[in-house]
Image (spheres, grey):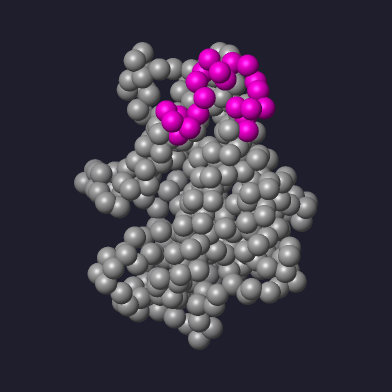
Amino acid sequence: MDDSAFGKEDARGFWTPNKPVSYGPAFDWPPQPRVLLKWLFGFPGYFLPWNVLYAVAAILIWMFLTPSLETLKTFSLSWAALILLRNIGLAIAVYGAWHMWLYVWRKQETDFKYNRQWPKKESSTFLFGNQNYENVFYTLVSGVPIWTAYEVLLLWAYANNIAPMISFADYPILFIAIFFLVPFIHEVGFYFAHRLLHWPPLYKVAHALHHRNINPGPWSGLSMHPIEHVIYFSTILLFFFIPSHPIHMINLASRLGVAPAQGHTGFDRVVMGDETSMDTSYYAHYLHHKYFEVNYSDGMVPLDRWFGSFHDGTPDAHEAMKARRLRRGV
């Protein structure tokens, strides 16, 4: 598949899609019912493939990879360790799959790669002198344990009637609806946590570590300072207030845990064959790693547009960003 049909490369070797970054039509005004229905039920769309995939994964994780509520009532290092091992396995499987396909096997070489250069194998910027080694280290040694700690806390709280719990039998419509509210909860929580992490004191102490990845790969997604992991995963605590089921919490927790791999591939799409590809739809987040002060959200809820930090990848948007910098005296 020829990426020149979908974008262009500049003199420095940066590839840019022809289509600017845009949000889904959920918040368009006036509403466009036909466009909205196509976005909701089309492929790719709101439900398919990713949100349905995360929902199904959460159900399977709850059914087969999580102890029973009766077991969860009494905190035990043994069942907490099982949750930790489960999450380590999920992280290795998901981050590893993206990394192997795109960066080890290089199945599509640099087609659709925003930065045509491969990450440097040796760099004093990174722990162990290697970008990927640092990313794997912070993901597995800090990210997954902190993700697990939040999840263990909520599982124990559900089991002891501290977190408000509903069942499918009692509230079937609400039960299903919450599955598809989780992406909005995730995105709004991520946006405000991310803006907080760009507060200069927190940026210097914590978030700067993540931004070492100016040419990110999949493992860059969860490579964060432990302080950032604590803030990033704190959205899970909202389920202390939202009537829900542990499946919904697992849906959010696992999304927070593994979705950053997709958001940091560094590629616009993954080629599946001569005529087919899977759109990763994360040009927005690549621009954040390139310019640091734009596109703090994932691009479904137009928070960046509302708060003046949106960059759609066009020259006009770049000029607007530079004008904002001049007004701040940067």
Evaluate whether residue 291 shows in this view.
Answer: no
Q: Name the chief secondary structure element in magenta.
A: helix
- Looking at the rendered image, the quarter that the N terminus falls into is bottom left
In the figure, residue 210 lies in which quadrant? bottom right
Compare residues 79 and 155 and report the one nearer the observer: 79
294 up-or-down from 60: above or below: below
Q: In this view, does 206 lie to the left or right of 41?
A: right
Q: Position of residue 150 (x, y in %)?
A: 62, 32
- Residue sitting at x 38%, y 24%: 175
Q: In this view, does 57 lie to the left or right of 88?
A: left
Evaluate whether residue 268 shows in this view.
Answer: yes
Outermost residue, front side: 78
Q: Where is residue 229 in the image (x, y as percent from the top left)?
A: 66, 44
Number of numbered discs overlaid on the protein picture:
0
Q: Position of residue 225 (x, y in %)?
A: 71, 51
203 up-or-down from 256: above or below: below
Q: In this view, does 203 lie to the left or right of 313?
A: right
Residue span colored magenta: 61-81
Outermost residue, left side: 34
- Looking at the rendered image, the quarter that the C terminus falls into is bottom right
- Residue sitting at x 32%, y 65%: 272
Q: Is residue 313 magenta?
A: no
Q: Does the magenta stretch include residue 69?
A: yes
In the figure, residue 144 lies in which quadrant? top right
In the figure, residue 176 lies in which quadrant? top left
Q: Position of residue 109 (x, y in %)?
A: 43, 75
- Residue sitting at x 55%, y 63%: 217
- Residue sitting at x 36%, y 13%: 170
Compare residues 27 and 82 and report the one nearer the observer: 82
207 up-or-down from 131: above or below: above
268 up-or-down from 261: above or below: below
Compare residues 146 and 290 and report the one nearer the observer: 146
